[in-house]
Amino acid sequence: MKVRKAVFPAAGLGTRFLPASKAIPKEMIPVVDKPVIQYIVEEAVASGVEQVIFVTAQGKSAMEDHFDKAYALEDLLDKRGKQKMLGDCRDLWTRVEVVSVRQHEPLGLGHAFACARNVVGDEPFLGMLPDDLVDNPGYPCAKQLVDVYNKYQCSVVALMKTPRELIDKYGMVVSKPVSDNVVQVFDCVEKPKPEDAPSDLGIVARYLFTPEIFQALSETKPGAQGEIQITDAIARLARKGRVYGCIFKGERFDAGDKLGYLQATIHYGLKHPELGAQFKAWLKNLVQGI
Ligand code: UTP
């Protein structure tokens, strides 16, 4: 079955990005000239997605507005002959359908995915964290997962080799290689101590779930913080042999974290078609003076 939908859980409180994220959703904070979430919607569209489902909360409506038609603005740009800007604004609401559902309380990432159950229905879907950027324009990370799904017809998680000091921030997997960059996952542990981690492969920011995930989530009990962890539901499916992992190719930035955000800004600033060359010259000068 074709993967047509992507769920973006965006109902978290964004405490790592305070005070910037107090009144503005952290997903709407710009990297160079686009909000973070736009990069990820573009990755979804480039991977074949036709419908994006935002899981949102109070104070997050700027995300829906960004992907909606802004009639007065478009009319003005049209009258002033600003066709390039007009095209960029129109692309936001014409290239993909955006639907949103609410998560009334931030009860965890697993719970956020469960909130999208009725809109997803009985089909495979991508899960994409809207504050996590993975740059690979030639082969988007989400498309890499879709290709693994098409081959194995199971859920797929994006995996990366995780430095020891970061292991306690990720779900770490027990797995066996099946090809160059694909593994079968047999179990996973949420945020273990480095000495207890089953491997150095951690789950990051992109998932492709079959509808089986919803049953697994409904059987998953909240953890110590009262949150339903997606890693626990993935572990249930993995123990039944229903999960593969894709060691993705691409540069990844956790833009929900201040350092990751700064790194993303430099990365995308250097690549920017209009600003990149000037920015690079300025940055070189700056670095020489440090
Ligand atoms: P994070 O832990 O990175 O986001 O969750 P957070 O909770 O917003 O931020 P911090 O840790 O307090 O800084 C990963 C993604 O899952 C969503 C978040 O919005 C984020 O995109 N999420 C998390 C939900 O949608 N609901 C939740 O209950 C928890």
Image (tube, rainbow, N blue to C red):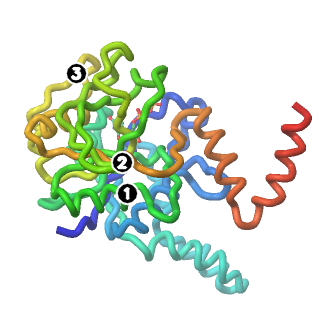
The picture places residue 54, in percent across and down from the top left corner, at 35, 53
Label 2 residue SS: strand
Circles 2 and 3, Cβ within 8 Å, touching? The answer is: no
Quarter holding the N terminus is bottom left
Res 142 label: 1
Q: Horizontally, is 5 left or right of 123 in the view? A: right
In this figure, which residue is indicated by the disc labeled 2? 206
Quadrant assignment, res 205: top left
Rendering quarter of residue 88: bottom right
Kind of residue at disc 3? Gly
Asked if the residue at label 1 sits under 8 Å from ligand 1, the reply is: no
Evaluate whether residue 217 shows in this view.
no
Q: Position of residue 74 (x, y in %)?
A: 59, 77
Q: Residues within 10 Å of mark 1 (few under 14, many from 20)?
A: many
Residue at x 32%, y 55% (from the top left corner): 145
Task: Describe residue 50's horizontal placement relative to residue 151 as left or right.
Answer: right
Q: Earlier in the sequence, mark 3 or mark 1?
A: 1
Image position of 172 with respect to 137: above or below: above
Q: Earlier in the sequence, mark 2 or mark 1?
A: 1
Q: Which residue is mark 3?
A: 223
Q: Earlier in the sequence, mark 2 or mark 3?
A: 2
Report, in whole angstroms, how far the alpha carbon at label 2 lies from the one at label 3: 22 Å
Q: Position of residue 62 (x, y in %)?
A: 49, 53
Q: Residues within 10 Å of mark 3 (few under 14, many from 20)?
A: few
Q: Quadrant of residue 167?
A: top left
Q: Nearer the viewer, mark 2 or mark 3?
A: 2
